[in-house]
Image: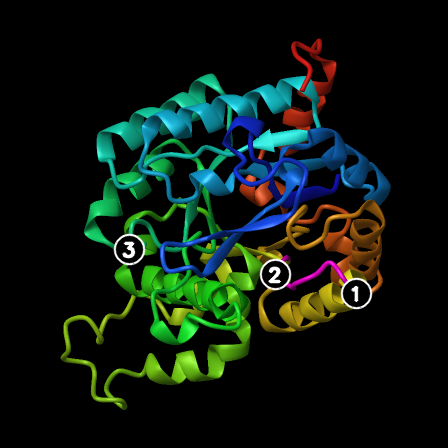
Amino acid sequence: MLIDFQQHYTPPELLKGDAGKLTVDLDRDGNPHYLLNPLLADLGAHIRVMDAAGIDAGVLTCGSGFDQPDLAICRTINDRMREAEKAHPGRFIGLAHVPALKGAEAAAELKRCAVELGFPGVVIASELQDQPLDAESLRPFWKACADLNLYVFIHPLPRVIRWSRMDADDLGRMLGWEFSLMTAAVRLINSGLLDELPTLRIQFSHFAGGIGRYLGRIRGFQQRDKWGTASLPRHGRQPKKPFDYYLDERLFYDIAGWAGPDHAAEWGAHWVKFGLQELPFSQLVFATDYPQAVREAGEVAAYTEAVRTLSADGRALAAGANAEKLIPDIAQRLAAARKSPVQARA
């Protein structure tokens, strides 16, 4: 059963931009930070693309909710996600969206999403309101996720990294997004969060920004005594176990992250090829990043086939390997949905 762990959906009432036109949303400094794509609101197109590629179901998240402090907007997104599930039984899985820095509000909405709506996870950005994911103010959010058995999907922050040299050439999305994922992964490991919450499951998008390509450097600077940081409060942090334990056994990663859609199969397969060499297969899940990285049915199908032909591990990923590690009841969940009467139409 092939599950696409990264599909984007924006309810029509929340999709900004010119109707029917592909535009880009700009941050307060005029930098591009999110693609306003009409396909985001077209669930019928999602279904056609999945059918063409042999994808059984897609996990839906909404960019408007990655770093959303407004509970009312989060609730609207969550309700629309549930409506999408009901309208297309067994084809979509919604994730929760919450104002993660607002402890009581976030906890209540997480519980509603887990218990009433039946979502298996929650999505957040790689930074929240300019706060890192290891901030003390986020500890209640992480504990609530662990207590509710919700996995956490981390997507690049909607806003670009606030570094002045990112103010040209679309560098915020090109490189800044990936740097933010790597930064979040290293900070979460060193913060001790994964030691405090041993059942917490986290899925990083885009191979955690391609973190495998930097592991030689990361491992080197984790040697605090060698680099003179052992006694520095913020820079000498170390987790309880070896750093690679968390990379190899505690974190999960999806295989999306290339930029398309031109040459989607070629570039996507190239990206996945290196990711398979750099991170353990046991922690990887299939993803397309539709409709942002790839937008046409033929491109998604070609990318899926390219992953399948990479190696035995590629074939396994394109057959749904490891999906149950993030959603343990995935087979029963989708089977039950398909047996239920359709309650709505999107």
Q: Earlier in the sequence, mark 3 or mark 1?
A: 3
The N terminus sits in image quarter: top right
Up-down relation of residue 128 to residue 90 (above or below): below
Rendering coords of residue 130 (x, y %): 28, 55
Q: What range is drawn magenta here?
A: 256-262
Mark 3 and mark 1 in contact? Answer it, CB < 8 Å. Answer: no
Residue at x-position 14% and y-position 72%: 233
Q: Earlier in the sequence, mark 2 or mark 3?
A: 3
By secondary structure, the bulk of the magenta-drawn segment is best described as: loop
In front of the other: 328 or 233? 233
Is residue 279 left or right of 272 when viewed as pictured?
left
Residue at x-position 82% and y-position 41%: 54
Rendering coords of residue 199 (x, y %): 40, 44
Cα separation between marks 1 and 2: 14 Å
- Name the residue that disc number 2 marks: 257
Up-down relation of residue 187 to residue 216 (above or below): above
- Name the residue that disc number 3 marks: 130
The answer to whether residue 329 shows anywhere in this view is: no
**Which element type, helix, strand or loop, lies under badge 2?**
loop
Q: Nearer the viewer, mark 1 or mark 2?
A: 1
Cα separation between marks 3 and 1: 34 Å
**Which element type, helix, strand or loop, lies under badge 3?**
loop
* Badge count: 3
Looking at the rendered structure, which numbered label has been put on residue 218?
none
Q: Residues within 10 Å of mark 2 (few under 14, many from 20)?
A: many
Which residue type does callout 1 highlight?
Answer: His
